Image (cartoon, rainbow, N blue to C red):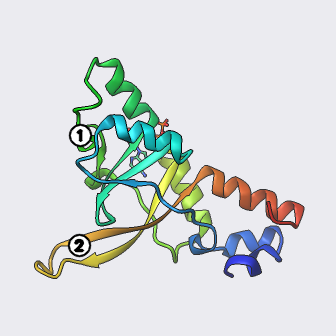
Amino acid sequence: FTGRQAREFPLNAMAEMTVASCLSQPVVVGTDTSAYDAVIALFTEDAGTVFVGDNNILAGVVSRKDLLKTAMGGNDLRTLPVRMVMTPVSKIIYITAAEKVLAAAQRLLAYEIDCLPVVQRIHDEADTDKKELKIIGRISKTNITRIFAECVSGRRI
Ligand code: ADP
């Protein structure tokens, strides 16, 4: 099931829905972006989490709490690069577009996080052993709440 089609099948269809059918646009800032500008991105994009990466290659994730903690530590957010405060890619929990929405929900709950980057694994042209994660979207608790509400009500929300 994809996109609109999936929403015409209530409740039991939820089990078959893939991440591709309900992902959102990701909010991405470069690794050199200041923590201050990451806070601005949270407000202007109305997101709770910002992904960090150059050319959409995932380098890390920065959340509200990461930024609050940094501000409380008395750091100068304007000069501190976001890569110093992010959770690095080695620790990031992610999902691919072909996986089930149910898997996304289970991952969000298991790791107690608000959102997952939706990624595509790509090979580095210069170093074929090195795998990189290209950011193609995000799936959050809000997306999953929307799917639930749409399937139960039978209409788009
Ligand atoms: P908030 O800080 O707004 O409560 P989260 O609960 O999602 O947001 O984040 C809690 C911690 O987990 C933060 O340190 C954040 O960097 C990290 N985090 C957020 N999303 C992920 C993810 N997909 N994978 C790994 N760590 C994450």
SS of the residue at dot 2?
strand
Q: Position of residue 68 (x, y in %)?
A: 41, 26
* Residue 95 percent location from the top left of the image: 46, 65
Q: Is residue 90 above or below residue 119?
A: above
Residue at x-position 42% and y-position 48%: 50
For the residues marked 2 and 1, what is the alpha-carbon distance in whole angstroms?
24 Å
Residue 94 in view (yes/no): yes
Give the number of callouts: 2
Of residues 10 and 26, the one nearer the viewer is: 26
Q: Quadrant of residue 86?
A: top left
Residue 129: x %, y % from top left: 15, 77
Quadrant of the snapshot with the C terminus:
bottom right
Q: Earlier in the sequence, mark 2 or mark 1?
A: 1
Q: Position of residue 103 (x, y in %)?
A: 55, 64
Q: Is residue 13 above or below residue 42?
A: below
Answer above or below: position of 17 versus 45: below
Q: Which residue is mark 2?
A: 131
Q: Is residue 108 above or below residue 135?
A: above
Residue name at image x 30 percent, y 57 percent: 53
Horizontally, is 106 left or right of 147 in the view? left
> The disc labelled 2 sits on which kind of residue?
Lys
| Label 2, residues with CA under 10 Å away: few <14, some 14-19, many ≥20 | few
Residue at left offset 31%, top offset 44%? 87
In the image: residue 113, left or right of residue 56: right
Q: Quadrant of the N terminus?
A: bottom right
Q: Secondary structure beneath disc 1?
A: loop
**Disc 1: which residue:** 81
Is disc 1 surrounded by few (<14), some (14 to 19) or many (20+) residues within 10 Å? some
Q: Amino acid at mark 1?
A: Pro
Q: Quadrant of ligand 1?
A: top left
Q: Is residue 112 visible?
A: no
Tell which of 83 and 143 is nearer to you: 83
